[in-house]
Amino acid sequence: MIAKLALENGTVFTGEAFGAAAEVTGEVVFNTSLTGYQEIITDPSYAGQIVTMTYPLIGNYGVNLEDFESVKPQVAGFIVKEYFDFYSNFRANSSLGDWLTQHNIVAMQGIDTRMLTKMIRTVGALRGVISTVDLHDDSLIEKARTSPQMEGLDLTKQVTTKVPYRWDEIDRTPFALSSPLPRKLNGKKWNVVVFDYGVKHNILRRLTSYGCNLTVVPSSFSAEETLAINPDGIFLSNGPGDPAAVKYAILNIKKLIGKKPIFGICLGHQLLALALGGKTFKLKFGHRGANHPVKNLLTNDVEITSQNHGFAVDPESLDPKTIEITHVNLNDNTNEGFRHRELPLFSVQYHPEASPGPHDSDYLFSRFVEMMERENVAVVK
């Protein structure tokens, strides 16, 4: 089946469909990871985006039941150079194409992904449309040009949980909001409220592995409700869209600053910066991949990191008297992390939980636990 990709700049690519027969618009971006396509496709931070893989061969190990980063695919569309339908892996239970078709995700292969990637790097991320239905170039280009801009778009409402729940990979149990959390639950030491702006499952797995009992709440969950259940710490998750558009989250975070230890990742990092009076801006083509070098300014170590974001924090907008920059991207010197000089809070732009990617930054979960431990001792005293 023929599929076409049309971009807002007038470029049209013709290829072959291997997912659902449909039409979808979105921001066209690229990811440089060599593996991990299942985790990328199910990452809620990709909501509203058409993801192009720069690695040429995709699909050879199929799809399994374990490597999901959310309950379903989240990308608007998916593009590869060459799709491999005859998968081979002892964990696999489906081909990538069948799985995407099952979830009504449009995917295409056979186009020059190198040309597309170089175009995005040159002019920036582009709005586009993939279609197997309408194959008329002029019509598709017009649809791309009239599709929504990512700036000013709050996509967290599309991916957040509808109701609060206790995290358990097998059973998600809704809970009453009227009572504080027990001091110990399921053998875990620390009670943490996770604001779900599009949280990845491996973040929840890593927090759990460090002794945290997790209560996952919607992105609009109020500061008052959060403090009423008296957690030991607060986690601000990753997610899609423009951070400046999630105004209700920024207002809630402002009310939580200084009340409980806070750790933010990706969109959570950006929202925390905005709550502290900082500013964010849209990157030309974003950071998406599993090999981005980040320098830890506190230790001078260089970490190879997994990243997925289209916006960044302006470090010049943060007050140096209260905020210390802790991490910087060695590719373009953008901000990758900060911490408060007095209050118990810190955040990073990249993904220490990986999935896919390296585990160089996993220590940040330990730092969060240590911060909660210090604050708990201080309260006891």
Image (spheres, rainbow, N blue to C red):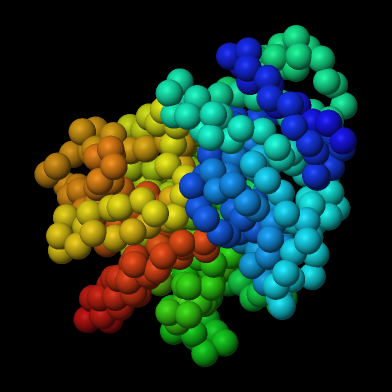
Q: Find residue 204 and report its horizontal and vertical position in percent.
A: 53, 68
Horizontal side of 73 relative to 310 (left or right) equals right
Q: Residue furthest left?
A: 321
Screen quadrant of the N terminus: top right
The answer to whether residue 77 shows anywhere in this view is no
The answer to whether any part of residue 92 appears in the image is: yes
Residue 267 vs residue 250, the one in the foreground = 267
Residue 160 at x, y percent in the picture: 63, 50
Eyeballing the image, is 303 above or below 274? Answer: below
Task: Give whichever of 108, 286 is nearer the camera.
Answer: 108
From the viewer's side, name the closer residue of 282 and 35.
35
**251 shown above or below 353:** above
Identify the residue shown where x is 70% and y is 73%: 89
Q: Residue at x 79, y 70 (%)?
A: 93
Q: Image quadrant for the C terminus?
A: bottom left
Q: Residue at x 70, y 14 (%)?
A: 141
**Residue 96 at x, y percent in the picture:** 75, 56
Q: Position of residue 171 (x, y in %)?
A: 72, 76
Q: Viewed as shown, does residue 78 lie left or right of 190?
A: right
Tally of marks: 0
- Displayed quadrant of residue 86: bottom right
